[in-house]
Amino acid sequence: MAKARAEKRIKQLRDEIRRHDYLYYVLNKPKISDAKYDKLMEELKTLEEKYPNFVTTDSPTQRVGAAPLEEFETVRHTKPMLSLDTALEEEDIQRFDERLKRELALELIEYIAEPKLDGLSVELIYEKGHFKIGSTRGDGINGEDVTENIKTIRAVPLLLRSSDLSIPEMVAIRGEVFMNINDFEEFNKQLIQQDEQPLANPRNAAAGSLRRLNPRETAQRPLDIFFYEIMDIKGMEVETQWDSLQYLKKWGLKTNTMVEKYSGSDDVIKYHQKMLKKRDTLEYEIDGVVIKLNNIELQEKLGVKARSPRWAIAYKFPSRVEKTRVMDIMAQVGRTGALTPVALLKPVDVGGVTVSRATLHNQDFIDEMDVRIGDVVRVGRAGDVIPEVNEVIKSARTGKEKKYRLPITCPICGSKVVEVGAFKRCTGGLSCVAQLKRSIGHFASKGAMDIEHLGRKNVDLFVDHGLLKSVGDVYQLKKDNLQALPRFAEKSAENLVDAIEKSKERSLARFIYALGIPNVGEHIARVLADKFKSLENLIAASEEELLSIYEIGPEIADSVTSFFKEKRNVKEIEKMRKLGVKAVVTKEKKEKPGVLKGKSFVFTGGLKDFTRGEAKRIVEELGGRATSTVNDSTDYVVIGDKPGSKYEKAKKLGLTILSEDEFKKVVGKKVMKYDRM
Ligand code: IVH
């Protein structure tokens, strides 16, 4: 009896969870809190553990968990996955339209216009509504079987929704996997914190994430998907591209909301202009629009060329890549001593932003591209990412260009430079002024000890005047020493000393993060603080103890133990403790009075005075919540420059909308703390 009840409850829970997944991930309209959702999931997991016979492959619990693979299997696509011819000018579209009219003997053609998503194409096969196989495009004929990885994408239903529209025997669907720009930036930040090379753009991040051999790793990456084509279907007929999209929607598959139906090429051209304006306000990258003949019978009549259909065309946006000259190359020394070559460019406008520097990553990158000083190059930028040199125009060479090699001694401190993997690293440690400055800067930064007024400029000033020779010296700064410096008055000196004093109360997690141990970002620092509870315990932790923690692998374990093996690091910590730094376990959020307790905020558009991360942190520190989706329960929507669709939604729902200045007022004086330095 209990068993029968359990079976019924399991079914109920699955339906309920699927419904919330659909509301949250596909429609972007969550109806319940995360906590309630987690509770449902927990209940389902517990029941399935107790009654493993009832576990099915399409249960919401089965998204993650498949074992890592040695390599991907190859799967043949149901039909070739074609690519598209491209158009850049209005005339190209007019010519395309003329050709279609001529070949189909029609006066007016009906088109579907869709955003062209900058991600990677996949084919998904559903049999009787169950998700069976997912594959990458590969060479168009055969792709890689990434089924388990695709299952981790929450917007992909494991079971199609049944509605008034029946579920086909089999349907093969094409979609585009991508990463949202915000998620990508967050992800890159983590990579940088872990001393890893950031990725060039969201597209590469999505591609790399989808092709992990370990599905658990893919599950950690915030991937999303839009579906746009029925490649093959059994047991149903589809007449138009428009209908295809309606069917996909009904089956619970996420489709883009900005798809339009037009007659003739004029409106298609207008659509392109409209989307180009919208481009920078979207949460994901698009690189153009796709124009498709709507009628599928007519599509078949026109047929395909070698690799692209004759009935569709990609109408691309002007690129965010521009030509300019490399005036010089220099080596920048980072916090951990890594030398990054940076190209100093003749300033150029790239998609509305003036670019005068671009990263060259490392020596291998320079060698492979063969970038030389004096070269004409193409620099590109994707979203808000650091500009990068994409291409060297070798035909523009005059013979006067000079090759560049990273120096063998540090350009800042003269210490020896050693090679660590693809990177060169200065061995000067904190005796290298560049590393010292960046380490102190990191120590005082917002996510770390959060010392107001100790930004880059002041750190440089204090180090240059010999007031700071180590990180711990921060706690020996005296008002008198500061006042002796140029531009420092009594009040500013006092403010800084007060801020330093306040930082002594910061939590253990923040302190661990502030130490700047390689591979230990904010999240791992929190994990370590939760586990070890005190600095003494952490310093004494063995590699085995560290490895026994779920989220800690050999690389982090090694980083942590090596850091504390260095006597001077431990000494520095002891010094700071003697000077009053507490670094104890506290629940940060509870410390604060929480004037925004229970209030939720959504930000949209660019803010002038804060980064998104800063704005979110302010809200959280005051007890509020910052989320990314606007719904009925959102209390405030803060709009910056070029607000996106969230703004429209907020207006529709009649929510309280705040400008950046109004937001500052709501969060009160606290804001001063985050003034940019
Ligand atoms: S249709 C036969 N629609 O663009 C159908 N493709 O340059 C061919 N893409 O490989 C594809 N958004 O990865 C289509 N709305 C969209 C798209 C789209 C992005 C990608 C797709 C394709 C590439 C062609």
Image (cartoon, grey):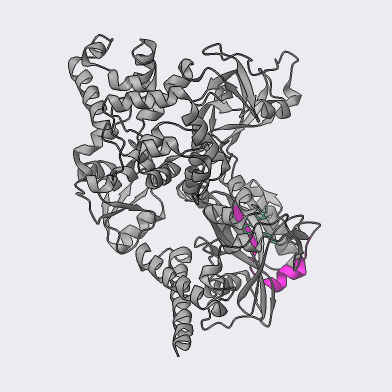
Q: Residue at x 78, y 56 (%)?
A: 307
Q: Is residue 670 above or below residue 334?
A: below
Image height of 652 relative to 43, above or below = above
Residue 520 painted magenta: no
Q: Quadrant of residue 303?
A: bottom right
180 left or right of 471 in image:
right
For the point 29% across and 31% down, the residue is 675
Vertical comparison of 159 with 430: above or below: below
User: In the picture, residue 363 is in which quadrant?
Assistant: top right
Q: Looking at the image, which is closer to me, 253 or 72?
A: 72
The image position of residue 49, as x and y in percent, is 50, 73
The x, y position of residue 606, in whole percent, is 39, 42
Q: Residue at x 39, y 39 (%)?
A: 537
Task: Write down the region rendered in magenta.
Answer: 289-304
Q: Residue furthest bottom?
A: 1
Left or right placement of residue 245 versus residue 623 in this view:
right
Residue 45 screen position, x and y as percent: 47, 71
